[in-house]
């Protein structure tokens, strides 16, 4: 084979892209919210049921805004409900 036909660019499959930290996103899934708060999934659902966390409206899956989760953290409320 002729080596002139091959590109010298790196193969994309060999390049590992770092995954963004959950704190770099604007919204969190329920799983990400649990991870950020350091609690279990059932605890996040209990916080939603007690209206201490409110998912963003109009979405198929529950998402929480970064601002709301950080406000909850800064409020000093105990997440163990």
Image (spheres, helix red, strand yellow):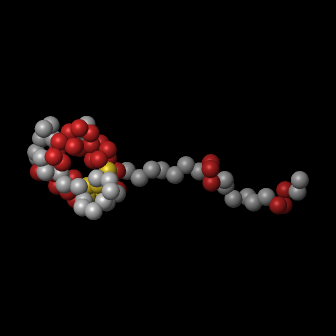
Q: Is residue 34 above or below residue 69?
A: above
Residue 45: where, in percent of width, then height? 21, 43
Residue 44: where, in percent of width, then height? 22, 43
Q: Which residue is rendered at x = 27% and y = 62% of the image?
A: 58
Q: Nearer the viewer, residue 45 or 9?
A: 45
- The residue lying furthest to the right in this view is 1
Q: Which residue is rendered at x = 30% and y = 59% of the image?
A: 59
Residue 28 visible in this rendered orientation of the protein: no
Q: Which residue is rendered at x = 32% and y = 56% of the image?
A: 60
Q: Nearer the viewer, residue 20 or 57?
A: 57
Residue 30 visible in this rendered orientation of the protein: yes
Q: Which residue is rendered at x = 21% and y = 53% of the image?
A: 69
Q: Is residue 77 above or below residue 70?
A: above
Which picture quadrant has residue 47?
Answer: top left
Q: How many marks?
A: 0
Q: Is residue 38 left or right of residue 11?
A: left
Q: Quadrant of the C terminus?
A: top left
Q: Is residue 33 left or right of residue 7?
A: left
Residue 54: where, in percent of width, then height? 19, 54
Q: Is residue 4 left or right of residue 79?
A: right
């Amino acid at each position: 084979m002729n080596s002139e036909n091959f590109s010298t660019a790196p193969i994309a499959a060999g390049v590992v892209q770092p995954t963004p930290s959950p704190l770099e996103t604007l919204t969190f899934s329920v799983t990400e919210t649990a991870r950020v708060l350091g609690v279990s999934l059932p605890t996040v659902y209990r916080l939603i049921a007690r209206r201490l966390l409110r998912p963003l409206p109009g979405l198929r899956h529950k998402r929480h805004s970064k601002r709301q989760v950080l406000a909850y953290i800064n409020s000093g409320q105990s997440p163990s409900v």
